Image (tube, grey):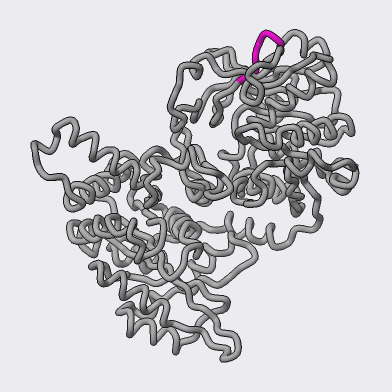
Amino acid sequence: MAKYVFVTGGVVSGLGKGITASSIALLLKSRGYKVFMQKFDPYINVDPGTMNPIQHGEVFVTYDGCETDLDLGHYERYIDEELNYTSNITSGKIYKSVIDKERHGDYLGATVQMVPHITNEIKNKVYEASNSSGADIVITEIGGTVGDIESNTFLEALRQIQYEQGSSNTFFIHCTLIPYIFGSNELKTKPTQNSVRDLRNLGIRPDALVCRTPFETNDHIKDKLSMFCSVPKENVIDSVDVNNVYEIPLKYYDQKIDEIILKQFGLEVKPAKLDYWKKLVKTVDNLKDSIEIALVGKYVELHDAYLSVAESLRHAGYKYNVKIDINWVDSEQLEKEKDLDKVFKNTKGILVPGGFGSRGIEGKIMAINYARCHDIPFLGICLGMQLAVIEFARNVCGIDDVSSTEFDPTCKNPIIDLMADQKSIVNMGGTLRLGNYECTLKKDTLAYNDYKVDKILERHRHRYEFNNKYKSILEEKGMVFSGINEKANLVEIIELPNLKHFIASQFHPEFKSRPTRPHPLFDSFIKASKENK
């Protein structure tokens, strides 16, 4: 029977519940247990697929095509496991499922209520994740903050699970803030006490506290929290601010939080295998050189909108012992810039990531043109690939009025167009081409060199594609179509072999990069950028 760890948050949002959950999962996995992770988000949206990236951050896509919260990216990067549709559950999904069942008559005429119908649906999602994954331990993070109206039904469902499964099969971790008051020079425990009181009023007593703090707490504070929150002193864990987030699992390991959990579960405390993670932390803390990479996007005011891309760049940097300094370039502002030499003065590589809509498009095309004409290593992702094709068609092939029908539905040469199976779609949510699709690589190309295999599986999130009518024209001028989805005859990778490094993919390689194993496309991009003089 699976064991369940629940991670809640109090006082304020943004305490790092996702990193905490990921770190604990990593530690439990290092001790030989199979772990699975999921996130409950209280918002009514069915998924974040239609939400503004500037407000919500990136949309992380699982291999089975589920659009999810960015915390799932943390989960996958830390535990190096592919998650699925059971890993991100929103209030919208819960309510939609319950309403569909009511319309179908599944409740046999009963009055549908928050308890038991909504809470039962939430519990089913926890148990479904357990059954489908076959995990020894399922770790569930609850989005939002205790006290928020929208999260109360999730917490009530977890209280019921605790009652059903017993304390030997459930473990509640509550993440809180211990603020430092300037002037009196004190750490204050009252916000944590109040947050735990709110949680206990909902029927849940936390088994451990993870306290976000600027520096380590002393015995007096731990004694105080232990007494007022009814938590054993050794279960009060410091989550000290760090410069390197990969240190956090090791900080928790030193405080034995994984041992505390396993002992409550009655599971063997096997030796932890963490040498590979300690090596990673040492590498990150001792990077010798640095290089600047320009990330040219339309959502750069919120860096979390490109979280997986930024992390993937850093992963490759770790391999080559270089710190990646990201130059966040707003593509909309770039359109007004007359001196691109000034913008890219110290840039060793240019990356143009994905996005939707016409805003800032010409600025991205300007950046691609600059990379091509100045032979600066370039990596394009999704929209970045589509715009690389448009730039090449305009400025090398001399094709007039060439664009994407996403930006200009009436253009004479739609080199990027809606996919055939997308043309009749009305609903925008959940209808993109999502998840894993196969791609066949052409031998003796940069892409084949990077992957060193004939076929790859990569995750997608797009609605538009390259129009194959223009393929031969671009090939005549030197563009190579090095990756093809043969089933749909869809262009997946393009490159320009006459340059140092110019490659772009229709898929999103950033979703499969890991801190100890960078994605091949980011690997070669950073290698070329480091060598770029």
Give above or below for 116 relative to 473: below
The part of the image, by quadrant, that contains residue 125 is: top left
Q: Which of 30 and 132 is in front in this view?
A: 132
Tell me if 15 is positioned left or right of 496 in this view: left
Q: Percent from the top left, x then y, of residue 469?
A: 67, 8
Instruction: Look at 31% across and 39% down and name the residue there.
Output: 132
Q: Percent from the top left, x then y, of residue 133?
A: 34, 41
Magenta-colored stretch includes residue 467: yes
Q: Percent from the top left, x then y, of residue 16?
A: 50, 62
Instruction: Look at 39% across and 38% down and name the residue there.
Output: 85
Task: Determine if residue 64 is in view.
Answer: no
- The span shown in magenta is 465-470
Instruction: Look at 42% across and 41% down and name the residue there.
Output: 47
Tell me if 32 is positioned left or right of 264 in this view: right
Which residue ends up furthest to the left in the rendered image?
109
Q: Percent from the top left, x then y, of residue 248?
A: 54, 64
- Quadrant placement of the C terminus: top right
Task: Determine if residue 527 is in view.
Answer: yes
